[in-house]
């Protein structure tokens, strides 16, 4: 479903996810190997995790989702990463953005002690453990994402879509892979 009225939070969520995407090493245009869906939604929880797992299966992509506490929030409260496997779907909730000076952005689940990053083929990779200098890396990631998001245009991209909980997934034909907002 295409959005007809632009709300300030939509552009804020879009620009944050596009900044996160770029810092993770995924181009903001639709790549040849389109394997990751970037989206934004409200606070996390079991129901949203199940919905994200369903969307990952229907979209045939892994998912990186930012959770926003409310419509006025300036930055997300956390992230969920959904990784599809051969026989299952793993949902890592409560993730934090992380980066070192020289490296690309990663998402870290301290609960699962797992780090997820975009590999050289544009696929999500995962490794066990929490990276060194975690607090410093989370501050750096938050600052870089914020700066990149603030530097983006204030227009909502074509293809930026709203999908209600339980809604049917429909792929977009837009050349720029705009984030999806889930209710």
Image: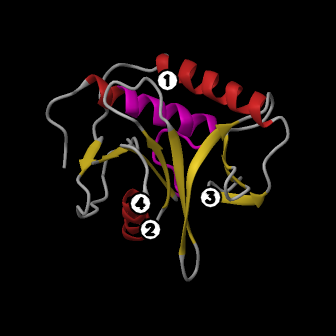
Q: Residue furthest bottom?
A: 87
**Which residue in the structure is indicated by mark 4?**
52
Residue 30 at least partly seen: yes
Q: Which span of residues is magenta-colored?
A: 12-34
Count of marks, rendered view: 4
The mark nearer the N terminus, 4 or 2, is 4
The mark nearer the N terminus, 3 or 2, is 2
Quadrant in the picture for residue 13 = top left
Front tag of 4 and 2: 4
Q: Secondary structure at mark 2?
A: loop
**Which residue in the structure is indicated by mark 3?**
123
Along the line of sight, the residue nearer the viewer: 178 or 52:
52
- Whether residue 15 is in magenta: the answer is yes
- Residue 105, percent from left and from top: 67, 39
Quadrant in the picture for residue 50 = bottom left
Residue sitting at 54 percent across and 78 percent down?
88
- Residue 146, percent from left and from top: 54, 22
Rate crowding at label 4 as few (under 14), some (14 to 19) or many (20 or more) other CA atoms within 10 Å.
many
**Which residue in the structure is indicated by mark 2?**
60
Measured Cα–Cα span from mark 1 to mark 3: 23 Å
Q: Which mark is residue 149?
A: 1
């Amino acid at each position: 479903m295409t959005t007809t009225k632009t709300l300030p939070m939509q552009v804020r969520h879009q620009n944050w996810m596009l900044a996160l995407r770029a810092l993770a090493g995924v181009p903001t245009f639709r790549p040849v190997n389109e394997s990751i869906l970037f989206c934004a939604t409200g606070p996390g929880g079991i129901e949203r995790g199940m919905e994200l797992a369903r969307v990952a299966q229907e979209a045939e992509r892994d998912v990186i989702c930012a959770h926003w506490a409310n419509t006025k929030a300036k930055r997300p409260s956390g992230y969920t990463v959904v990784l599809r496997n051969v026989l299952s779907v793993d949902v890592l909730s409560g993730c934090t953005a992380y980066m070192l000076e020289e490296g690309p952005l990663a998402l870290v689940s301290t609960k699962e002690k797992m780090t997820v990053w975009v590999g050289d083929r544009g696929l999500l990779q995962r490794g066990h453990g929490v990276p060194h200098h975690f607090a410093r890396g989370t501050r750096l990631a938050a600052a870089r994402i914020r700066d990149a998001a603030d530097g983006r245009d204030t227009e909502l991209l074509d293809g930026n879509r709203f999908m209600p909980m339980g809604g049917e997934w429909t792929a977009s034909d837009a050349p720029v892979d705009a984030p999806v907002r889930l209710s």
